[in-house]
Amino acid sequence: MSDHHHKETFITKYIFSQDHKMIAKQFLLTGIFMALVGMLMSAMFRVQLANPGETSILYNLMPSNWMDPDTGALLQDKYLALVTMHGTILVFWVLTAGLSGTFANFLIPLQIGARDMASGFINMLSYWFFFAATVVLIYSIYVPSGPASAGWTIYPPLSAEASYIEGSGLGMTLWLVSITLFIVGSLLGGLNYIVTILNLRTKGMSMKRLPLTIWALFVTAILGVLSFPVLLSCGLLLVFDRSFGTSFYLSDLIIGGEAAHHIGGSPILFEHLFWFLGHPEVYIILLPALGMTSEVISVNTRKPIFGYQAMVLSLLAIGFLSFIVWGHHMFMTGMNPFLGSVFAFTTLLIAIPSAIKVFNYLTTLWRGNIRFTPAMLFAIAMVSTFITGGLTGLILGNAPLDINVHDTYFVVGHFHIVMGLSAIYGMLAGVYHWFPKMYGRMMNKNLGYLHFWGTFICAYGVFFPMHFLGLAGLPRRYYANPVDMGQITDINDIITFFALAGAVIQFIFVFNFFYSIFRGSPASKNPWKANTLEWTTPVERIHGNWPGDLPEVHRWAYDYSKPGAEEDYIPQNVPLKEGESEH
Amino acid sequence: MSTSYTLENIRKEKATMQLLWIGMVSICMFFAGLTSLVFVDNMEIPSESDWFLYSTVIVLFSSLVYLIVSRNIKRDKPVSFLIFMVFILGLIFTYCQFQGWSDMRNNYGIIFTGENPETGQATPKEHSYFYAITVAHFAHLIFGLIALFITFFNALRNKYSSKKFLGIKLAGTYWHFLTILWVYIYLFINYT
Ligand code: HEM
Ligand SMILES: [Cu+2]
């Protein structure tokens, strides 16, 4: 491979790098940064919910015109701005780009035995589109009229006219510019992931031997290239409505006593287009986390993953079904009840492959020789919160039940448990597990445990009580609680307490992460004694991943504790012994 | 660059073609999103101008010519003039589209946005939609024209042979795709 070693400058090595490992780190660092921004925003609106109308030093993080000049309280429409930015950042920036961008880039070439992505150049473009999107989004926070404020789902009419809410002015325009750049970046990334997996697998790495991480990232990328373009068409028409005065989504509205000039459009169209992306998007977020969890659990139970084929098939089933359930976000739009029951049916079907996955995780854990590394704890927690959140999903998927709790804190509780906890835990499991491969050093284990238990307790403290608030009728996105809820009125204070404590605890992780990059104890080549190919590469980063020839694959990734073997793991590049059968 | 046709090259070519194919699937989803609107809302899209019939014939003809390009290059016959011809046909197609849009505006009163000068009514979304979907096709066509031009330029410099013509394959696949996409849009706006 020495002929592949061209001279690297600082710029080509760290900035405009085409090396997938460096691009992965760029995605990860941007993702962590955005996660902190999004988290601080949630701390601010949680403080408002606990102490409505009072001031807080936290608000000083935002431009000064976000506070009431007399009381110092957070302004009402800026509360909505915070909620909107928080959702946008967490859903798209952290759990889509931060998660897929990091681990698809890092793991695909390393785990399939390729020197790099199919196109390093497109891969680099993918990151820089994402970066540009980030700059525009951050900038939009500081424009005088404030950032987009119509919720992360940017439903028109609220998002369509600056006269409805300040954030629907320049801030919304910038949101749309930013998300367009984001979509282009995601598509370029997704194209590359798919083509790389299909074409660049090393000798012996048949699809049936692919680690489940790669299967999950593969299905995720397919969902992305099929659904993001629809969001683009959805956003394009919104741009026309906002900037050129067309009426796709807007109809005979009265604003301030005057009839608007729009006729004949329908905001429901927007919801259809949005949720056609929106639902696959939640699986774009979840599947990579599920994939990494499979890997981490198998390695740390020292057992083959239970039901490999069922795992792959359920990934494919979830991917397929996720395209025909979007209507469950729209039960309250006055849709034909028959159509509603069709969507309820398809939605409940997703429970089957989801339950299969959970069952297989549990059976893998059963009687395993479990090593509780921080990554493993996060992976187990990922499975546990997927169960908790999936159960409320079943409730929401039933139209007659959903109608009662739609747009309340019950929904907020549901999706935070599946995304805010499950997907984030999967991502953290990935960071703790692959950190030694990324930076050649180990993260501190004890800080990891502290981070895990603190996060786990606080996160449940935040999101579990939300279900009760929702059942009691508290609508989501309200600036303050308008109804007297008797005994549970103080729940908001408890939630805020856990939210702030949980936020502080995340800095343990941030410290551990950056400290370990420079000072962590040096990692060995294969610290977890894992089977996948990335652990056969040398510790120091090289362009092309393997010195000399690419490894050849002889077995699946899950030969742990195989009867008759000397050690409890057999890497994929070890040939079968004479008379040894594949799993 | 070596002229030997190694296994590595075949793999790379296959991967590049796949990148294009998956990209085209993405573009299809974009237009499927736009299409779905019409069914959700039972819209009737205007399509009065005859210019769009002309452009349809032209773009079909351009694709036919490109088929000859693909055949010729496999036999090492000259292609640069034919590619140039496809490029020019693409420009004529563009001309027809622009004529069609101005025809719709000036002679049929179908505008993208704003108030109808005679009736004072706001533009119905069917009319805006007509422009949205046809212009969206044109936006994709620009990249096709660029690709044709680059391919033509490379053909002039004898970059292609029967052994090595990935560029011709890529540009052609995309150009045929644009043709099919346009025919679809044409039928769609005429029959809804
Ligand atoms: C068993 C699986 C699941 C079912 C049956 C399900 C069902 C539902 C339903 C019916 C709603 C609409 C509630 C309403 O607005 O009234 C909903 C909302 C939501 N779900 Fe799920 N869900 C499931 C899993 C997931 C997963 C795995 C994720 C993400 C990782 C997720 C993310 C969301 C989000 C983000 C929303 C709310 C979006 C919003 O209105 O802002 N769900 N879910
Ligand atoms: Cu959904």
Image: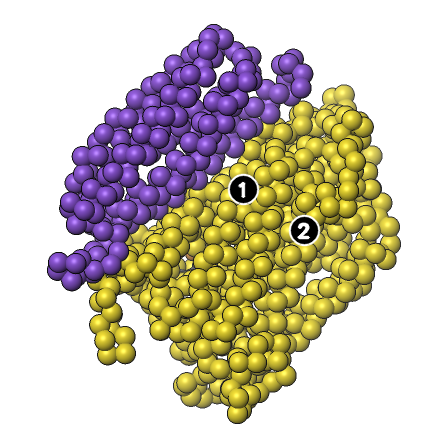
Residue at image coords 78%, 49%: A439
Q: Position of residue A40 (x, y in %)?
A: 61, 72
Q: Is residue A387 left or right of residue A173?
A: right
CB at mark 2 closer than 8 A to ligand 1?
A: no
> Mark 2: few, some, or many residues within 10 Å (few <14, many ≥20)?
many
Q: Quadrant of residue A571?
A: top right
Q: Which residue is mark 2?
A: A26
Q: Report the image quarter containing ligand 2.
A: bottom left
Compared with A23, A111 (above or below) is: above
Identify the residue at image location x=50%, y=57%. Answer: A178
Residue beneath label 1, please?
Answer: A188
Residue A304: tell me if it is visible: no
Front residue of A240/A427: it is A240
- Classify mark 1: helix, strand or loop: helix
Q: Which chain letter goes with mark 2?
A: A
| Mark toward the start of the polypeptide (2 vs 1) | 2
Q: Quadrant of the C terminus of chain A?
A: top right
Left or right, residue A377 beside residue A134: right
Chain that is yellow in the image? A
Quadrant hosting residue A462: bottom right
Quick one: SS at disc 2? helix
